[in-house]
Image (cartoon, rainbow, N blue to C red):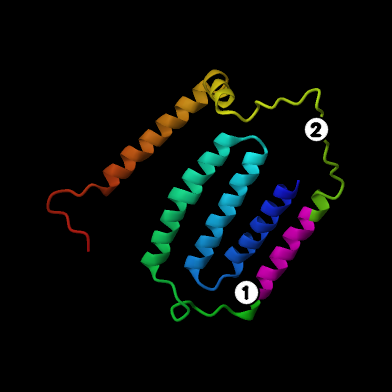
């Protein structure tokens, strides 16, 4: 329980750091810390595969992409346009409305405890996930792979230069 509370505390602090950091690179680093703490939560839930995928895909590949875009755009306070007070007020109203809706939706939720008689400790293991993925969801899995293949072929075709073609 104490490890869960520690990870939750660090996740909340780092998520707040993402929002309130002045430097975009610091914000990305806080986001990486948030992803690592969420991977710790996955490990506590006995979902090792999700924890590994979260670290590899999100904390690895996606964060490299975010850092590349931030450094490519060269964001700083001089080039950032000033936001009017009306936009800040509208954002505060929208955030408060979202908080109110979340509180109203979760007001009567009663979380259930774990029943030791029916608890399956192997539920988040990779072999179980593979069995479900390749038996029950084989067709959607294959359709998703065909969709990704078509997207890769399309991006290569769009990015391919013709002879004599000039960009800019």
- In the picture of the structure, the residue carrying the numbered disc 1 is 87
Residue furthest front in the image: 2
Question: Which range is magenta?
Answer: 87-102
Main SS type for the magenta part?
helix
Q: Is residue 142 left or right of residue 156?
A: right
Q: Is residue 49 above or below residue 104?
A: above
| Residue 13 found in image quarter | bottom right
Image point (51%, 26%), residue name: 140
Q: Is residue 65 magenta?
A: no
Q: Where 99 falls versus 93 (above or below)?
A: above
- State the residue at coordinates (71%, 25%): 120
Name the foreground residue: 136 vs 158. Answer: 136
Q: Nearer the viewer, residue 48 or 90?
A: 48
What x and y, as percent, mark residue 101?
77, 55
89 inside magenta stretch: yes
Q: Position of residue 73 (x, y in %)?
A: 39, 68
């Amino acid at each position: 329980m104490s490890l869960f509370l520690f990870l939750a505390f660090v996740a909340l602090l780092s998520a707040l750091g993402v929002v309130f950091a002045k430097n975009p690179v610091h914000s990305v680093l806080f986001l990486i810390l948030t992803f690592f703490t969420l991977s710790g939560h996955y490990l506590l839930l006995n979902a090792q595969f999700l924890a590994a995928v979260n670290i590899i895909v999100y904390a690895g590949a996606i964060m490299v992409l975010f850092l590349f875009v931030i450094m490519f755009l060269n964001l700083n306070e001089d080039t950032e346009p000033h936001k009017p007070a009306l936009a800040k007020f509208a954002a505060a109203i929208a955030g408060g409305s979202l908080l109110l809706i979340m509180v109203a939706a979760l007001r009567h939720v009663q979380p259930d405890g774990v029943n030791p008689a029916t608890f399956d400790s192997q539920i988040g293991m990779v072999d179980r996930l593979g069995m479900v993925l390749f038996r029950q969801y084989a067709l959607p899995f294959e359709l998703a792979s065909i969709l990704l293949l078509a997207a890769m072929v399309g991006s290569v075709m769009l990015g391919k230069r013709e002879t004599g073609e000039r960009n800019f």
